[in-house]
Image: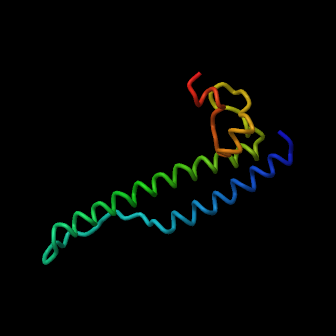
């Protein structure tokens, strides 16, 4: 992988990181939806519970992807970017183009 390739992936990953951090800001962690049901319908409580569940699932997904992006950026800085975490072989450019934070080469992703 050339230094230009690394710089391109680093730029892409930094943009993705900024996007994910912004998205996390739009989905604040909600730990309590309240317990006051007086005068409110149970349908409204069910809607709030569903919204809480979806919001927390979205946050978890965003945080997991952000972690993978941060790992990829760390690997670029430490010289290990583009190496498969399983077989230690090279991750193909086609895989990195599609998924710059990929941990695995195509063969290991497919279970071979």
Please, which residue is most extreme toward the right here?
3
Residue extending furthest toward the bottom: 39
Classify residue 56 by image quadrant. Answer: bottom left
Q: Which residue is drawn at the image coordinates 45% and 53% (left, top)?
A: 60
- Furthest toward the top, the residue is 112
Q: 68 above or below 29?
A: above
Find residue 82 and report its horizontal and vertical position in percent. Answer: 73, 37
Instruction: Indicate the quadrant containing the N terminus: top left, top right, bottom left or bottom right.
Output: top right
Which residue: 64% across, 57% down? Answer: 16
Is residue 24 shown left or right of residue 4?
left
In-image side of 61 versus 51 (left or right): right
Q: How is the image coloured?
A: rainbow
Q: Is residue 17 above or below residue 81?
A: below
**46 and 33: which is toward the camera:** 46
**In-front residue for pair 98/42:** 98
Position of residue 98 measured from the top left corner of the image (x, y, whole percent): 66, 44
Quarter of the image that includes the C terminus: top right
Q: Is residue 48 left or right of residue 40?
A: right
Left or right of 11 on screen, residue 30: left
User: Residue 104 appears at what percent x and percent y?
Assistant: 63, 33
Q: Residue at x 33, y 63 (%)?
A: 51
Identify the residue at image location x=73%, y=34%.
92
Instruction: Say which quarter of the image contains residue 50.
Output: bottom left
Marks counted in the figure total 0
Q: Is residue 98 above or below residue 18?
A: above
């Amino acid at each position: 992988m050339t230094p230009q390739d690394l710089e391109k992936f680093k730029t892409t990953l930094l943009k993705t990181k900024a996007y994910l951090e912004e998205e996390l800001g739009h989905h604040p962690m909600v730990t309590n939806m309240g317990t006051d049901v007086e005068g409110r319908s149970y349908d409204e409580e069910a809607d709030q519970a569903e919204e809480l569940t979806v919001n927390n699932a979205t946050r978890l997904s965003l945080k997991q992807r952000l972690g993978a992006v941060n790992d990829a950026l760390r690997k670029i800085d430490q010289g290990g970017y583009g190496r498969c975490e399983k077989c230690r072989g090279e991750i193909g450019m086609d895989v990195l183009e599609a998924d710059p934070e990929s941990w695995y080469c195509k063969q290991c992703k497919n279970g071979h």
